[in-house]
């Protein structure tokens, strides 16, 4: 091998190892969990961080967050829900916030099991209202289709599962192994930072949400989990699940942001085709961050 060939081979090895080196420098989940608020449940797939809010013995509302922003996304909405007389359970999906980041494909069944485990851990054996935001909308849809007897009502906030656009890197890496993994770990953090910074000046009911979101990029297992979800629960449309929900006559409310560039408003028509009984509301001027940028309007639209 020539000197140039050897140098190129070393450079290639170094580039290939760069994502692993970056990941090793990120914070370990157990170190983050030490200072976490709320409580932890040892579930079948890993340790899950959760919090209760509101009066005891009140009807239970479970809030499920999205792809990249953990349960703190609900901090602005939860006071509205508790003031309306609900007891709210919020938790971090695996690989986000303070929950563990187990390996494996993060499919709808994977997240359905986490939610089912948590409800069992907390002794909740009566039907609950589920509120799902973005990917959380896809998760609660999967749960309701699998366990219709455990769901009283379904509230979907800019829900995934009917078409979405998470950017060119996510589109490419979803279907390409190895090279896709490398490109995702190298390029997606920059794309996510740019999206967060673009919204930093927007009004928010969650104090410091941009910095809280950016901090996720410093936790080990986050990027792997996001990519796994893109290849899992977000991979295919949920037409069959929505039709099952309609057949089970579970009341559904869906709320959309008119200016949402991630989950386009055209998904409203798709949901109408799949479930003609769903009540749908559109918030003018709202983008994908409507849970924290238009919290008051969202609370009124949900009417829980």
Image (tube, rainbow, N blue to C red):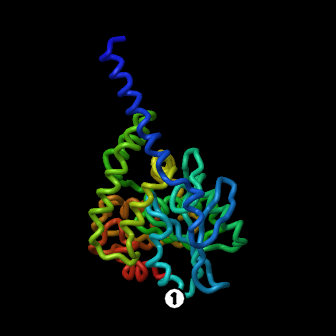
Is residue 133 positioned above or below 101 on the image? below
Q: Nearer the viewer, residue 128 or 296?
A: 296
Q: Which residue is mark 1?
A: 83
Where is residue 257 shown, x and y percent of the image?
33, 69
Of helix, strand and loop, which one carries label 1?
helix
Task: Give the residue furthest to the top.
Answer: 1
Is residue 205 positioned above or below 223 on the image? below
Where is residue 80 shown, x and y percent of the image?
47, 84
**Picture quadrant where residue 145 is located:** bottom right
Asked whether residue 235 is in view, the answer is: no
Identify which residue is drawn at 53% across, 57% down.
241
Identify which residue is drawn at 55% across, 63% down.
92
Q: Nearer the viewer, residue 261 or 94?
A: 94
Where is residue 104 shown, x and y percent of the image?
58, 44
Tell me if 61 is positioned left or right of 229 in this view: right
Identify which residue is drawn at 38% across, 78% down.
205
Asked whether residue 12 is in view, the answer is: yes
Identify which residue is drawn at 35% across, 52% down.
166
Question: Which quadrant of the rendered structure holds the N terminus?
Answer: top left
Q: Nearer the viewer, residue 196 or 298?
A: 196
Q: Residues within 10 Å of mark 1 (few under 14, many from 20)?
A: few
**Picture quadrant where residue 22 is located:** top left
Where is residue 298 shown, x and y percent of the image?
40, 77
């Amino acid at each position: 091998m020539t000197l140039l060939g050897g140098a190129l081979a070393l450079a290639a090895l170094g580039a290939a190892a760069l994502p692993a080196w970056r990941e090793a420098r990120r914070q370990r989940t157990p170190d983050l969990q030490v200072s976490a608020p709320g409580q932890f449940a040892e579930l079948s797939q890993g340790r899950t961080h959760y919090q209760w809010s509101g009066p005891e013995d009140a009807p239970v509302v479970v809030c499920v967050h999205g792809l990249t922003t953990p349960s703190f996304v609900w901090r602005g909405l939860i006071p509205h829900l508790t003031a309306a007389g609900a007891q709210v359970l919020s938790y971090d999906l695996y690989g986000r916030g303070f929950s563990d980041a187990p390996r494996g494909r993060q499919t709808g069944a994977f997240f359905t099991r986490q939610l089912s485990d948590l409800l069992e851990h907390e002794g909740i054996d009566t039907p609950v209202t589920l509120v799902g935001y973005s990917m959380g909308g896809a998760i609660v849809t999967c749960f309701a289709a699998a366990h219709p007897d455990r769901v009283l009502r379904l509230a979907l906030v800019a829900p995934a599962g009917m078409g979405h656009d998470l950017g060119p890197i996510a589109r490419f890496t979803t279907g390409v192994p190895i090279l896709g993994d490398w490109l995702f770990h190298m390029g997606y953090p920059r794309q996510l930072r740019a999206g967060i910074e673009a919204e930093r000046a927007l009004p928010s009911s969650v104090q410091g949400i941009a910095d809280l979101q950016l901090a996720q990029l410093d936790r080990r297992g986050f990027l792997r989990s996001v990519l796994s979800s893109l290849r899992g629960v977000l991979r295919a449309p949920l037409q069959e699940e929505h039709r099952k929900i309609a057949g089970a006559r579970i009341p559904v409310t869906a709320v959309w942001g008119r200016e949402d560039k991630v989950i386009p408003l055209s998904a409203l028509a798709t949901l109408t085709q799949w479930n003609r009984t769903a009540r749908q509301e559109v918030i003018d001027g709202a983008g994908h961050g409507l849970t924290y940028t238009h919290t008051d309007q969202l609370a009124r639209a949900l009417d829980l």
